Image (spheres, helix red, strand yellow):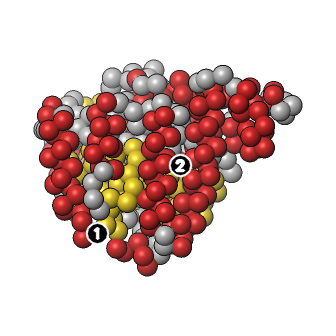
């Protein structure tokens, strides 16, 4: 379903949900994102490369005079009614938790008097393409719009961070929301997550001969129910130990540790702290080399770095599941694929591949056949698509 069809569907479903005409109807179009390099390091202040793509959360909504948000979803059953005065405690088995988190974050920082009625639809929830940040931002922007709040991009980033870190308890960084908000078509974003700054790297001419292809394993995941937060804690402990060994005082992020301290003292860390730090410092170097390779149009080098990133995610960061590692192994051995790695936390969801453009259809067919032979239980949900570059979040 393309974006025009998604806009039409959500508007139709909103009218169907309310049972009456509502006016005016607005839309938030919040794209998903890919991160070709920069795995598992944004929560440590590491640099990342991000790119918005042609998959979305779309929220059709209309403001009301009641301090309540009433929602329905095209991806999940049931409806939700959320008070702007008290969004309630987080419940990770409810699809409306991101809407509740949006109320939580906005109400901490602004006065909310007007609610909304809305219908939301996502392309691929839970796939590791940051659908969570996408839909969270959609709710934040819609609530701000009906309450006449003017939010700059940095504040939107921070509000979504509060939604995910403080309300949901997911200790991720700002890669996802920054990419979604600052995204530009035909560009790679180089994001300094420590300083929260963004540099736009335009696609080189050589990029036109290649496509990013997303392969969905058929298995979704909720990061709060995985080892995600445990890995973040292990990284923080690694930073604290390295800081003490190097006489740097109290440090909580690996980005606060100079490379020299890692080289001099890293061998003294016990596992798993040494492994997590190994991944961080090697991934930072890959992002820096990858940014230059993309700028120079060296797609072969960029693909190799993606492969190295995924290998480090598996071996040093110890993320992955049987299905997602199996999918990665199949994709990485398929002719025409320059490089591939997990998309998102790596406990399910998608694998992202950089593919020669004339080989895309063949690669998709071969990967599908081999993967479903190994994991036939994924047959009903497995899919793949070309991730075309798009701009960032829009309020229409």
**Which residue is denoted by mark 2 in the rendering?**
38
Horizontal side of residue 246 vs 5, given as left or right: right
Horizontal side of residue 278 vs 316, given as left or right: right
- The residue shown at (44%, 67%) is 299
For mark 2, give the secondary structure.
loop
Nearest-to-viewer mark from 1 and 2: 1
Q: Which residue lies furthest to the bottom in this view?
A: 205
Image: 244 above or below 117: above
**Which residue is denoted by mark 1 in the rendering?**
357
Q: How far apart are marks 1 and 2 (CA)?
A: 24 Å
Image: 287 above or below 210: above
Image quadrant occupied by the C terminus: bottom left
- The residue shown at (18%, 61%) is 362
Image quadrant occupied by the N terminus: bottom left
- The residue shown at (51%, 67%) is 294
Does the rendering let one see residue 291? yes
Q: How many marks?
A: 2
């Amino acid at each position: 379903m393309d974006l025009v069809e998604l806009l039409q569907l959500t508007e139709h479903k909103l009218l169907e949900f309310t049972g009456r005409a509502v006016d005016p109807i607005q839309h938030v179009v919040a794209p998903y994102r890919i991160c070709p390099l920069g795995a598992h390091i944004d929560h440590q202040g590491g640099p990342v490369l991000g790119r918005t793509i042609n998959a979305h959360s779309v929220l059709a909504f209309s403001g009301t005079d009641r301090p309540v948000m009433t929602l329905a979803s095209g991806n999940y059953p049931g409806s939700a009614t959320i008070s702007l005065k008290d969004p309630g405690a987080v419940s990770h088995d409810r699809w409306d938790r991101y809407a509740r988190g949006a109320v939580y974050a906005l109400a901490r920082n602004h006065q909310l008097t007007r609610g909304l009625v809305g219908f939301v639809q996502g392309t691929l929830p839970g796939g590791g393409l940051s659908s969570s940040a996408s839909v969270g931002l959609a709710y934040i922007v819609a609530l701000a719009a009906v309450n006449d709040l003017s939010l700059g991009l940095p504040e939107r980033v921070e509000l979504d961070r509060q939604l995910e870190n403080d309300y949901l308890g997911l200790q991720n960084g700002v890669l996802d929301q920054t990419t979604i908000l600052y995204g530009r078509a035909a560009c790679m974003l180089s994001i300094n997550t420590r300083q929260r700054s963004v540099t736009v790297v335009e696609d080189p001419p050589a990029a036109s001969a290649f496509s990013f292809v997303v392969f969905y394993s058929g298995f979704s995941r909720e990061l709060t129910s995985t080892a995600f937060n445990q890995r973040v804690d292990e990284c923080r402990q690694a930073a604290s130990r390295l800081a003490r060994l190097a006489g740097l005082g109290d440090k909580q992020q690996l980005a606060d540790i100079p490379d020299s301290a890692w080289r001099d003292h890293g061998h003294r860390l016990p596992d798993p702290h040494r492994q997590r730090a190994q991944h961080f410092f090697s991934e930072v170097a890959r992002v820096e080399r990858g940014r230059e390779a993309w700028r120079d149009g060296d797609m072969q080098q960029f693909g190799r770095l993606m492969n190295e990133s995924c290998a480090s995610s598996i071996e040093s960061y110890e993320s992955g599941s049987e299905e997602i590692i199996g999918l990665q192994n199949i994709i990485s051995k398929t002719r025409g694929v320059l490089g591939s790695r997990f998309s998102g936390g790596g406990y399910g969801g998608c694998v992202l591949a950089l593919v020669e453009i004339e080989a895309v259809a063949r690669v998709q067919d071969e990967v599908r056949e081999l993967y479903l032979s190994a994991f036939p239980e994924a047959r009903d949900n497995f899919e793949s698509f070309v991730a075309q570059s798009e701009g960032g979040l829009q309020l229409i």
